[in-house]
Amino acid sequence: MIKGHGNLKEVRDATSVIPAPIEPSAVTDALLSIGIRPGSVALVHPDAIVAAQFPAMPNGQRLDLLIEAMEAAVGREGTLVVPTFSYSFTKGEPFDIRNTPSAVGMVSERFRKQPGVRRTSDAIFSFAARGPLAQELCAIPIKECFGAESVFAVLHRLNAHIVDLGCSMSRGGTFVHYVETAYGVDYRYKKVFSGTVISADGQASECSIVYNVRDLTRKSDGDLRRLQKRLADDGKSRTAEVGRSRIMAVTARDLFDTAWKMLDEDPVSLIAEGAHL
């Protein structure tokens, strides 16, 4: 018996199951297959795990190619919107539109820094956008994070596609807080945060913003498993596989209407307190 032969076989077996890399065009194709079209407004929650499946190259290049793949789906006539949320303002730090980093992932931060990308002025729940509607979105004066005049409300009126790209709805479901605020759920309450906001042209001003925060005395953590199942059962959500990742899309109106109906049926249907284990 050859010494070490068993170990060599294990290495070969392990190597044989490594998935082949995917091309960035596979992401574009997957987005098109779930309803994104040239001219769409797409709010995408991207996870860098998707880019990690591209052929070997520097990480920054992979992220750029993922962003290009997303924009290829909406085309020049469409607008790509990506969360660039940051929570430092709630801790007393200034919010600098140009320089405060995104706290929600590498793709988000990479997109924020690219040429031609604009950022909204919400000191807590900002978005980066590029496309024909980017200027309009970023001109909205934000007084309430999830209020009737917020970017979330505009995305609702535009019936934007909300896309979870490689992540679950539990991470990519921030739009639900806009629904909860409009509905008036009793497990959130409005809290005012004040501080300094530095505009895109470097001008500093004092700002106050209302954030509908969770009641921490309750099991108010978001649990969107029931919502995700309802959307699927009702044929409202669309999914596609891209490599080892899943993409899910739903329109803003379908998400709003479905979540609203669920709150009518069960006021805690969107949080851990109402989870059906």
Image (cartoon, rainbow, N blue to C red):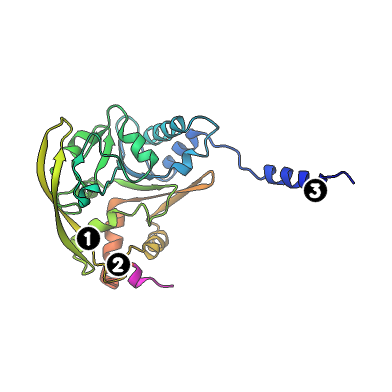
The residue under label 3 is: 6
Which residue range is magenta in the image?
A: 272-277
Identify whether 240 is placed above or below 188: above
Alpha carbon distance from label 3 to label 2:
52 Å
Label 2 crowd bin: few (<14), some (14–19), many (20+), radius 10 Å: some
Across and down, in percent, residue 165 comes to 42, 46
Does residue 133 appear in the picture of this structure? no
Q: Amino acid at mark 3?
A: Gly
Q: Amino acid at mark 1?
A: Val
Alpha carbon distance from label 3 to label 1:
57 Å
Q: Circles 3 and 2: CB distance less than 8 Å? A: no
Identify whether 254 is placed above or below 63: below
Element assignment for label 1: strand
Q: Which mark is residue 112?
A: none
Across and down, in percent, residue 74 comes to 35, 36
Element assignment for label 3: helix
The residue under label 1 is: 213
The residue under label 2 is: 220
Front residue of 106/155: it is 106
Judge left or right: residue 34 versus residue 7: left
Res 105 quadrant in image = top left
Q: Is residue 263 magenta?
A: no
Res 139 quadrant in image = top left
Judge left or right: residue 247 versus residue 260: right
Q: Going 23% across and 56% down the picture, which residue do you hit?
A: 178
Across and down, in percent, residue 197 comes to 15, 41
Res 146 quadrant in image = bottom left
Kindly report which numbered mark, 3 or 1, lies closer to the viewer in this rendering. Answer: 3
